[in-house]
């Protein structure tokens, strides 16, 4: 019998998605009849708007959509994505610069697989979304963390980025609004970071999936448009999941220079071929329609955001800067680590999150999942009553810590 490992080193190195793990445990407890309130989900709690669903139903009836279509996406959808990008970001792109992917996640994998050679470094601002490190690792790249905290509202400065840059740095990953922190860079900060990247010949991969979810006075700035100096070294990642409540439909895209898009399309043609035509036609209705559905969701999220931040900051030992975008709050719970709570002494945010799930039946994702222990991520994409009940249960429990 061969003594070679059953699973390759490359795949063994991939961690389970911590966000999905919390969600699975919460769902299992719920199924067992316990009244768990989950703040783990990274998806809107609204259904997909009716006109988008109708477009999918019509597409399912058309025989031409029962067949393979071009691996890189339906030409009409690529056109519509190029037009939407001009409309929302003022960024001029041709349909040939668009690759339609199986959700934003596939775009993340493909961009790093396309840009990175072994040893190439990627600057990633921590706290970061859990998928990025795995995608960089799989491509043979090396992630270099640029760690931020609540004192700056989780925003990285040019000085911090410069301190992390080496000869091997190829890519800066720029995510604003951010998952998990909700941080949004101002136009000035975005321009400063983009110019710094351009000056050093870095590529910028920018994940704009939360572009329409910004609150208060915050504004979304596309670094691709704001910093023309980046030229043909910028790749935009985006998708319909968050803007149109379409997480289950699996449509995202990547926009970049022609050579990158062509290479990534070759990869996709062997990995998955075309995204489901029915989903692509739903996405076409979404991106060619107006933004009224997201405007409605945004006002509900804004109300919940304010309620959640206020309630979190009332809990002793919890500090939550105001998130300006996406639908997550990212409070620090560092002061509570090591304190006694119901006869236990949680030594990390992961242990504290587990105790909260067991004792208060509330699921939160610990900061360990995002590269910064000592924090929790709570999604506010859930109903107002559940939100108030969940944070209040957690608050009551945490107030016992001493
Ligand atoms: C920052 C960010 N980018 C991309 C995605 C990908 O979303 P999807 O693959 O559902 O389109 C997500 C989803 O959670 C995300 O939070």
Image (spheres, grey):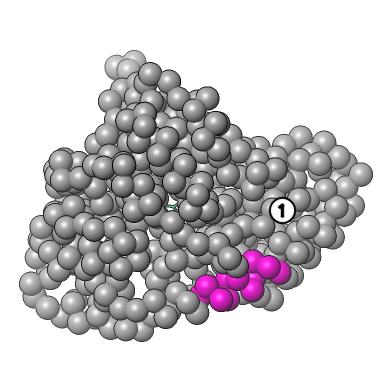
Q: Residue at x 15, y 41 (%)?
A: 259
Q: Residue at x 16, y 58 (%)?
A: 94
Quarter-of-image position of residue 372: top right
Residue 131 appears in the picture as rendered: no
**Residue 50 placement (x, y as % from top left):** 36, 84
Q: Is residue 298 magenta?
A: yes
Instruction: Give neighbour class at mark 1: few <14, some 14-19, many 20+ (Cα, 10 Å).
Output: many
Q: Residue at x 44, y 46 (%)?
A: 191
In the image, is residue 333 above or below residue 45?
A: above
In the displayed structure image, the side of residue 191 where residue 237 appears, left or right: left
Quarter-of-image position of residue 182: bottom right
In the image, is residue 286 above or below residue 139?
A: below
Quarter-of-image position of residue 335: top right
In the image, is residue 304 above or below residue 55?
A: above
Residue 373 appears in the picture as rendered: yes
In the displayed structure image, the side of residue 180 where residue 111 appears, left or right: left
Front position in the image: 351 or 94: 94
**Residue 265 placement (x, y as % from top left):** 16, 47
Front position in the image: 260 or 380: 260
In the displayed structure image, the side of residue 277 where residue 387 appears, left or right: right
Q: How many marks?
A: 1
Q: Which residue is mark 1?
A: 320
Q: Is residue 308 magenta?
A: no
Which residues are the magenta region?
297-307
């Amino acid at each position: 019998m061969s003594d070679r490992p059953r699973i390759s080193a490359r795949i063994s190195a991939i961690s389970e998605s911590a966000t999905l793990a919390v969600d699975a445990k919460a769902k299992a407890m719920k199924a067992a009849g316990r009244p768990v309130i989950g703040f783990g989900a990274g998806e809107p709690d609204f259904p997909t708007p009716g006109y988008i669903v109708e477009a999918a139903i019509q597409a399912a009836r058309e025989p031409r959509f029962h067949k393979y279509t071009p691996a890189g996406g339906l030409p009409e959808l690529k056109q519509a994505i190029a037009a939407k990008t001009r409309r929302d970001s003022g960024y001029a792109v041709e349909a040939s610069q668009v690759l339609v992917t199986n959700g934003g996640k596939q775009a993340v994998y493909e961009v790093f697989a396309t840009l990175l050679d072994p040893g190439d470094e990627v600057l990633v601002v921590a706290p970061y979304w859990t998928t990025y490190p795995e995608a960089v690792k799989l491509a043979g790249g090396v992630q270099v963390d640029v760690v931020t905290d609540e004192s700056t509202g989780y925003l990285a400065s040019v000085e911090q980025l410069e301190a992390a840059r080496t000869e091997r740095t190829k890519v800066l990953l720029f995510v604003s609004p951010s998952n998990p922190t909700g941080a949004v860079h101002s136009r000035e900060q975005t321009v400063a970071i983009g110019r710094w990247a351009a000056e050093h010949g870095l590529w910028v991969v920018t994940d704009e999936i939360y572009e329409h979810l910004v609150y208060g006075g915050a504004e979304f700035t596309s670094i691709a448009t704001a910093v023309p100096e980046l030229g043909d070294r910028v790749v935009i990642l985006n998708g319909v999941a968050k803007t149109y409540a379409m997480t289950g439909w699996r449509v995202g895209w990547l926009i970049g220079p022609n050579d990158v898009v062509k290479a990534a399309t070759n990869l996709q043609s062997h990995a998955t071929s075309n995204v489901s035509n029915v989903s692509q036609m739903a996405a076409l209705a979404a991106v060619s329609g107006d933004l009224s559905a997201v405007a409605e969701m945004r006002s509900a999220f804004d109300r919940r955001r304010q309620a959640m931040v206020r309630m979190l900051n009332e809990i002793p030992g919890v500090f939550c800067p105001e998130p300006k975008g996406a639908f997550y709050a990212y409070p620090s719970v560092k002061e509570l680590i090591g304190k006694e709570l119901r006869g236990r002494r949680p030594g990390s945010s992961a242990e504290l999150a587990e105790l909260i799930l067991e004792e208060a039946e509330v699921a939160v994702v610990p900061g360990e999942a995002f590269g910064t222990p000592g924090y929790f991520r709570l999604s506010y994409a859930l109903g107002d009553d559940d939100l108030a009940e969940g944070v209040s249960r957690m608050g009551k429990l945490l107030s016992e810590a001493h």
